[in-house]
Every structure is written in structure tokens, then in C-alpha cells.
Image (cartoon, rainbow, N blue to C red):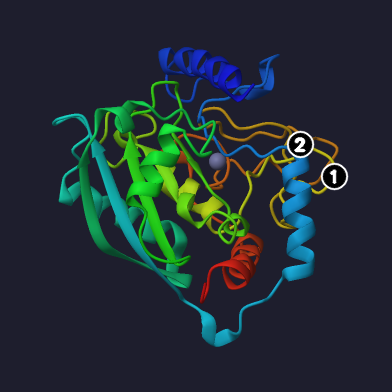
Amino acid sequence: MRFLASLFALALLSQVQAAPFGASDSLTRRAPSVTRVCGTEPSAQKVADIESRFQSERRDPTAQAEPFAVSVVWHVITDGTEGALSDATIAAQLDVLQQGFGSGYVFTTSSVNRVDNPTWFTGIDGSSDTSGSVAYDMKKSTRTGDAMTLNVWSVKFTNGLLGYATFPSEYSRRPEVDGVVILYSSFPGGTTAPYDLGQTVTHEVGHWVGLYHTFQGGCNGQGDGVDDTPAQGRPTSGCPARADTCPRKPGDDPIHNFMDYSTDICLTEFTPGQYTRAASFMTTYRVGK
Ligand SMILES: [Zn+2]
């Protein structure tokens, strides 16, 4: 299903890219408009399981616990010269990530691991990290560090994905696949405009610290588990002036939130509620693990 959804989204992406920037109006479309394509779209059941575990295991940070010090290992997967991100591009990406998260986190590059492996470069579809898959092979062979080590693999998805991530609560059971996988051309200065400013990494690391999409669950129910992100019925397409996909609920859609699907230039913020949630997830599942 996810693969089909990705293909559908890719088709929409093509339409949006053909239109002038910002010209699409999500409110006038009949079908859900998806532009950013993230592979981290947990089912309602998976969200319920994560939230249930979190309620019983939750530990909140002490004032002294922050900022969270995160070591970053960049695995630059290539096919010959294709995908060979420069050290300068990686440094620029680190800056974008740091600026997005602000002073509550300190991201530091600990190493850059360059691996020429065409199978890994184009063989990952984001659908499965189970044993025997290309993604599992890549991650198992290369992942380093502990739960506070952010492993970033840059690859060339061929199905329209920009990235996908694991959640903190998954670390204890499957530490070998923990991290984020990113389309290499979404790094700053890449060729995947309007997703070429590096906010795909910020978005995926948002999942890695415990955040869902702002449109998780749609207009009703628990949504993304964060009180100060207004209810959102569907992902934002492009960068509209405003949107309100849940008109019966308070607030406009959080179109500038890093956990929406807007274009890179549109994404500028996490909310205080997201910082609080992420800090609790980090404390419960990553710090000291
Ligand atoms: Zn996502």
C-alpha cells in the first residue's frame, strides 16, 4: 500500500512541480494533495502502540538534561561519483538541522562514512527494514554508536521518497536499524527543488526524536499528540498563504511546521509542545541508552 501511495504521491509531485511555485491551492483540490513524500507514515495501530507504551514508560527530562548532545554519523552512499556529497554540503546540512532544532539540541558531526555501493544507493524503497532487505543490509553493516548517535544515510530513492526515519521507542528492540535515510539530492544545494534546502533532514530527525506528522490522525482523535499544533486534515501541498483543512477545529493548519509536508522554504518551526514531547521521548528512550 505504501508503495502505491508513494507512486500516487509522485504523480501529484510531478503536477505540482509543473505549476508555478505556490500556485496550487490545497483547498480547491478534491483529492488529498501530497507533495513531500515521507516514508514514516505509521498506521493508527502503530501510533496507538507507541502511545500506549509511552504512557507507561514515560520519563521527563530534568532541567539539567538539556541541551541534548547528538553525535551525527553521515553515511554517504554512492554509485561512483553520483551521490558523493561534499564535506561542505554535509556541513551546510548540519547547520540547517541545528538551526531548525535550536538551542535545545547540539548536533555534532562525529564522522563521515563514504561507501560506494550501487545496490544500497538505489535499492531502498523505504517500505521495510526487515532482515534480508537491502535497507537492513546497509544499516546493519554500517550503523555505529548508541541511541544518542544519529545515523544519517544518504541514498537515491527511485520511488519519489524524500526520506524516512525510525522512532525512539523502536531503538531498544531494533537498535541496528535506528536512524534516518534521506534522498541525497535534498541536501542543501541539491537538485530536488523545491526540496533542496535541507529541511528533509530536519523533518526526518523530527520523527527520530519522537514527533509525528502534524496531520497524523486527521481532524479527529488524538492527532499528533501535541496540544499546540492545530488539527490538520491532510498534508499541505506547496507553500500556500494559509490553509484550514479542519474548519470545525480551532486554528489554521500548521503549514510552517517542520512536521508538515510543505516545501522546504515554507518550513520554519517546531512548537513548544513538540519540543516538550520530543524531550520526553529523548529522555525515555535515548539518553543513556
Ligand atoms: Zn515524515
Q: How many residues crowd mark 1 within 10 Å: few (<14), some (14–19), many (20+)?
A: few
Name the residue located 34 percent from the left edge and 60 percent from the top edge. Answer: 72
One can see residue 281 in this view: yes
Q: Is residue 274 above or below residue 45?
A: below
- Give the residue pinned by disc 1: 221
- On the rendered structure, is 33 left or right of 125? right
- Note whether residue 251 is visible: no
Q: Secondary structure at mark 2?
A: loop
Q: Which circle marks residue 277 in the picture?
A: none
- Expressed as whole percent of the image width and height from the top left, the position of residue 203 reads 49, 46
Q: Is mark 1 within 8 Å of ligand 1?
A: no
Give the residue at x 73% y 47%: 47
Q: Which residue in the rendered view is the most extreme toward the bottom?
A: 64
Residue 218, labelled with which disc? Answer: 2
Tags 2 and 1 in contact by the CB under 8 Å rule? Answer: yes
Residue reaching furthest to the left: 81
In the image, taking residue 283 as reference, residue 30 lies left or right, namely right
| Quadrant holding the N terminus | top right
- The x and y percentages for residue 132 are 47, 35
